[in-house]
């Protein structure tokens, strides 16, 4: 058994034991290799998982175990039913926005939904379904994005694998374009009617 093979087996084991998601830095430390040596280890791990109902989800910072594409539809159907009971329609709408539109500010999410989403965002953050990151274009606000755990639960390795991804992205872009641009000022959204939304709930 090669060193890479041994490290790949360890990576799978640690991802399972740690709950499915680990930062790339921590995973490299746990399996016993340098962060720069992790790529071939993960490639080997993915190959080992190919014959199972699992696969790997990789982002620039994290790695997660996920259901394999051929089992994803069944898992996704069950999960969405559970989520609809757990977080309600509002939660599903916000998740749809961050999944299909991509990282979005609270102001942008409010604008698309037409209502204040503070409490819904707090709920999704607490459940680990979305995460908050800095906005590189505006240091005064945050962006919300899907977590690796959410992608793993949905059984996809990247958002592009979601059902009707291209169609949904085009529809969202067309909606925003048809409604006209909006201006944000430190967490406040201004629409064409003069309505405003309150500050970021997690700031």
Image: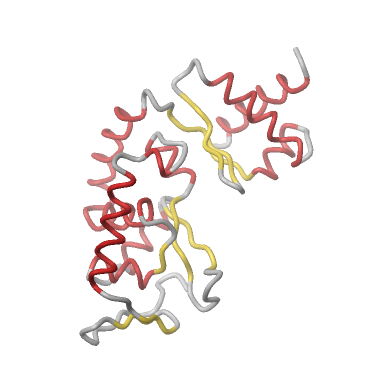
Question: Residue 20, can we see it?
Answer: no
- Taking 138 as reference, is 170 left or right? left
Q: Residue at x 46, y 65 (%)?
A: 143
Image location (x, y in percent) of residue 109: 33, 66
- Taking 14 as reference, is 156 left or right? left
Q: Residue at x 53, y 73 (%)?
A: 137
Instruction: Name above or below for residue 89 compared with residue 152.
Output: below
- Taking 199 as reference, is 65 left or right? right
> What colour scheme has been applied to the protein in the rendered image?
secondary structure
Judging depth in this view, the residue of 193 and 75 nearest the camera is: 193
Image location (x, y in percent) of residue 123: 36, 59
Image location (x, y in percent) of residue 110: 30, 70
Farthest residue in the top direction?
1
Q: Quadrant of residue 194?
A: bottom left
Instruction: Name above or below for residue 143 compared with residue 51.
Output: below
Instruction: Name above or below for residue 93 compared with residue 4.
Output: below
Farthest residue in the bottom direction?
194
Badge count:
0
Image quarter hosting the N terminus: top right
Q: Residue at x 30, y 39 (%)?
A: 163
């Amino acid at each position: 058994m090669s060193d890479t093979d041994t490290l790949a087996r360890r990576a799978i084991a640690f991802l399972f034991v740690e709950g499915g998601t680990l930062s790339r830095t921590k995973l490299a430390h746990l399996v016993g290799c340098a962060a720069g040596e992790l790529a071939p280890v993960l490639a080997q791990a993915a190959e080992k998982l190919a014959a199972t109902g699992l696969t790997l989800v990789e982002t620039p910072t994290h790695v997660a175990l996920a259901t394999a594409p051929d089992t994803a539809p069944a898992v996704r159907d069950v999960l969405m039913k559970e989520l609809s009971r757990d977080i309600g329609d509002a939660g599903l709408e916000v998740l749809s926005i961050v999944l299909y539109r991509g990282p979005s500010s609270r102001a942008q999410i409010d604008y698309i939904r037409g209502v204040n989403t503070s409490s819904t965002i707090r709920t999704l953050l607490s459940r680990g379904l979305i995460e908050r990151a800095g906005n590189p274009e505006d240091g005064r606000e945050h962006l919300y994005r899907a977590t690796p755990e959410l992608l793993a639960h949905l059984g996809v390795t990247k958002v592009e694998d979601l059902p009707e991804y291209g169609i949904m992205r085009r529809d969202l872009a067309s909606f925003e374009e048809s409604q006209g641009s909006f201006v944000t000022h430190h967490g406040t959204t201004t629409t064409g009617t003069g309505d405003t939304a309150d500050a970021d709930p997690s700031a």
